[in-house]
Image (cartoon, rainbow, N blue to C red):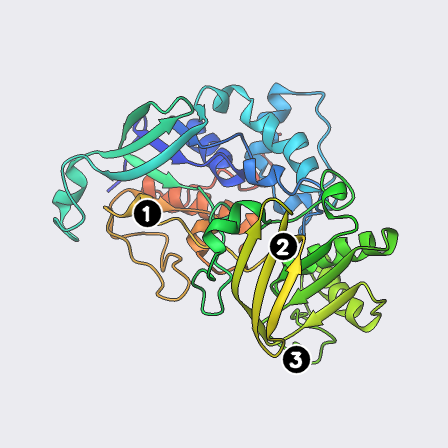
Amino acid sequence: MAVESPAQIVIVGAGPIGIEAALYARFLGYKVTVLESGEVGAHLRKCEHVRMFTPFSANCTKLGKSALAAQHPDLSLPLSDQFVTYGQYLEQYLQPLADSDLVVDCLKLRHTVLSVARSSQTKTENFGQPQRSETTLVTLAKDESGREHVFESDIVLDCSGVVGQPNFIGGGGSPAIGELAARPNFETGLIDSHGKDAKRYANQQILVIGAGHSAATNICQLSVLARETLETHVTWVTRECKADGQNGPVTVIEDDPLPQRKRVASEANQLLVEENGHLVHWPETTVKSMHYEPQNDQFHVTLEGKHTGIHTFNRIVANVGYRPNLEILQELQLDLCPNTEGTKSLIQPEPNFYILGSKSYGRDSSYLISDGLGQIRRVFAIIGDRENLDLYADPPSGSNQA
């Protein structure tokens, strides 16, 4: 059943997918409120120095570019085949889009969502029944002063992502002993070892945990810093040994359609072959416990596995992936994958509720922004009950449209 405009849509998250979804909805005539716990593109700002794995054309839309051309005719966008940094993408595309007339008045920044639920039905009521959609969706959020607000809507799109919810570093995925207390003092994202983080990591004993592309990116960054600051030493701990046919633990896809991703993975593995005394890899090893000493600004870490022992580090970088925050969705009827906690389908049992973007992939790290943009197109075709609705499509051949 179609939900016609001007119905009310609440969008959780003002990252790339949240902003693009707001633009799409406003263009179709829906009323929109975007709730964001920080600033626009908050997660992108933390890795603004890192080059994206995909070209600009894969991270923007025709609708977005048209909106910017109409409002900012002098704005110079990156070239379609250009691999920009997250900071450039934010500055040159996403932030101007958020500041455009169709989006800016929808934004409620520094509003942290606490829950999404039905106004008068709990999770246990009317599963799969038409009555489930007869009450409005209510989103409870807290502003920066601590005041709580309720936002009623016909539709909710959860585009909040996963970066704010890092996995735990214990061997089985649970917190290592002492991790919860120590977590505020170590990094779980991508560091800028030649910018804002240079002084913090130079000439330090650093523990890097993880074997994915985030860990590989940090290893590449820190290896350069280690060559420039001779007292910098990096210990790289992974549960895995060497990836099949590789010099290190990061899986390299030989026919990877994303050359930037392949380059980072290959470079990180190769650094272990070119070992120069500043980088050591400890495979088949996990963290059992840790204790942070604030007076000395250092960690005492107990490892188990192939390199069992107690070691002291000044810095820890834990890149073990992310998980979706499902706590805010406890009263909704969801169908989630049992191993990734991502969605099995774009359409959930909860009527008019959709999870878009990286959160829909759960713990699966293969998500790309282009995947989320495709979801936007599909979800509005569902909402409008118009299978061929596509605001991202090229104009028909011979059309006079710009």
Extreme front residue here?
295
What element does badge 3 sit on? Answer: loop
Q: Position of residue 372 (x, y in %)?
A: 50, 47
Closer to the eye: label 3 or 2: 2
Kind of residue at badge 1: Glu
| Residue that carries the numbered disc 2 in the rendered image | 316
Mark 1 nearby-residue class (10 Å; few <14, some 14–19, many ≥20): few
Counting from the top left corner in percent of width and height, residue 252 is at 68, 70
Q: Report helix, strand or loop for mark 2.
A: strand
265 w.r.t. 195: above or below: below
User: Residue at 49% of width from left, 45% of height from top?
Assistant: 164
The residues bearing labels 1 and 2 have C-alpha atoms spaced at a distance of 27 Å
Residue 377 placement (x, y as % from top left): 45, 44
x and y, in percent, of residue 343 in the image: 37, 56
Q: Which residue is mark 3?
A: 244
Q: Residue at x 34, y 32 (%)?
A: 9
**Quadrant in which the N terminus is drawn:** top left
Find the distance from the CA under tag 3 to the CA under tag 2: 27 Å
Residue 327's disc is 1
Of the image marks 1 and 3, the number of the one nearer the N terminus: 3
Proximity of marks 3 and 2: CB atoms separated by less than 8 Å: no
